[in-house]
Amino acid sequence: MRFSHSTAKFLVRMAIGCFLILLLALGSLMVRVAPAWVDAPIASLSLSPSDRLALRIIGYDFVCTSQKVADNWIDRCTTSLQDRPLTMTLTHAKPFRAFETQGIACQANFAEKALPCEVWFDFATGNVPNVVIKDSLGLSLADLQALRQQNFLSQISDPQWNTMVFTLAIVAGSLTALSARFDLGWPIKIFAGISLSFLIWGVATIGLSRILYGLGGARYLNTSPGPEIISILPLVLGLGIGVATIRLFQSRSRLAQILIIVGSGCGAFSALFYLLLLSVLTLGFVD
């Protein structure tokens, strides 16, 4: 089934619109439940039973109190699991410091049953600890699955986030390349030229670094003129090729069309990939 030029152009634009709506919805949800922005003494709760699904709940809905008794601080947070209260209590003599778990006593209580717990820190939550309970708390597999669905973004692992970021970037690059196929206006030509310029700069930087390292090891990279070559020559190459390709785009040659499609697709892929990667790192979904 073949579409006319106008129909194909409309379908591509509609797909881009749907993709942008998806990105906006995902971004809005990520901001709402970002682990890095939790304002509570306990950043998250993780249930890690050995024979069941793991569960992590970010502390946005925790009800917390902090008080000083004698020389110790007592931080207590409460949440609800399947309509039953879970209380986590941390006792410590000095302020929390990232990755220092010594001197922090953790005690949990679920449905009036005392349970041991542990604390851990990650880069996302900084000086705010996370609590781990190595028990299913008597919750069934169905209960854990229901809680995971309610907090689904918190259950995504680092490799799964990386796969998601890469996939979304691939989709963005493909849609942009298709859009360039049907619309060769100057905005897309300039974007393609800038993208190719950055691509050549990056490839040249990596290539020259490897060549110099192969010639003389690390000393070629750290002593003059190694650093100057690596910093200046790729920049000149990138700018030169960027200007040359934009001038080439003034023609209607087949080569110009291919470069516009490839450059715009690579540019959209790189831009969204690094934007999403920075977002998930900054918001605390990956370490």
Image: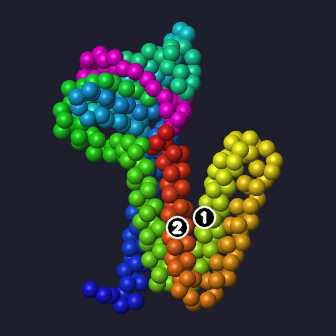
Residue 200 pos. (x, y %): 63, 65
Nearer to the camera, 77 or 7: 7
Number of numbered labels in the structure image:
2
Q: Which residue is mark 1?
A: 199
Magenta highlight on residue 161: no
Q: Which residue is disc 2 drawn over?
A: 266
Instruction: Tell me: 55 left or right of 62.
Output: left
Tell me the distance, in whole angstroms, between the alpha carbons under discs 1 and 2.
8 Å
Residue 231 versus residue 191 in the image, above or below: above
Q: Residue at x 64, y 87 (%)?
A: 250
Q: In the structure shown, which secondary structural element does the residue marked by tag 1 occupy?
A: helix
Query: Do we see residue 83 in this rendering?
Result: no
SS state under label 2: helix
The location of residue 214, given as percent across then percent down, is 65, 47
Q: Is residue 125 magenta?
A: yes
Residue at 50% from the left image edge and 64% from the top image edge: 269
Q: How many residues crowd mark 1 within 10 Å: few (<14), some (14–19), many (20+)?
A: some
Colour scheme in the image? rainbow
- As displayed, is residue 2 above or below residue 164? below
Q: Are marks 1 and 2 in contact (CB under 8 Å)?
A: yes
Name the one closer to the observer, 284 or 9: 9
Amino acid on which the number 2 mark rests in the picture:
Cys
Rendered residue at 70%/61% (across/down): 234
Q: Is residue 150 above or below residue 14?
A: above
Q: Nearer the viewer, residue 206 or 197?
A: 206
Magenta residues, start to end: 108-128
Asked if residue 176 can be seen in this view, the reply is yes
Q: In the picture provided, is 256 more to the left or to the right than 75?
A: right
Mark 2, Cα crowd under 10 Å, few <14 / some 14-19 / many 20+, is: many
Q: Amino acid at mark 1?
A: Leu
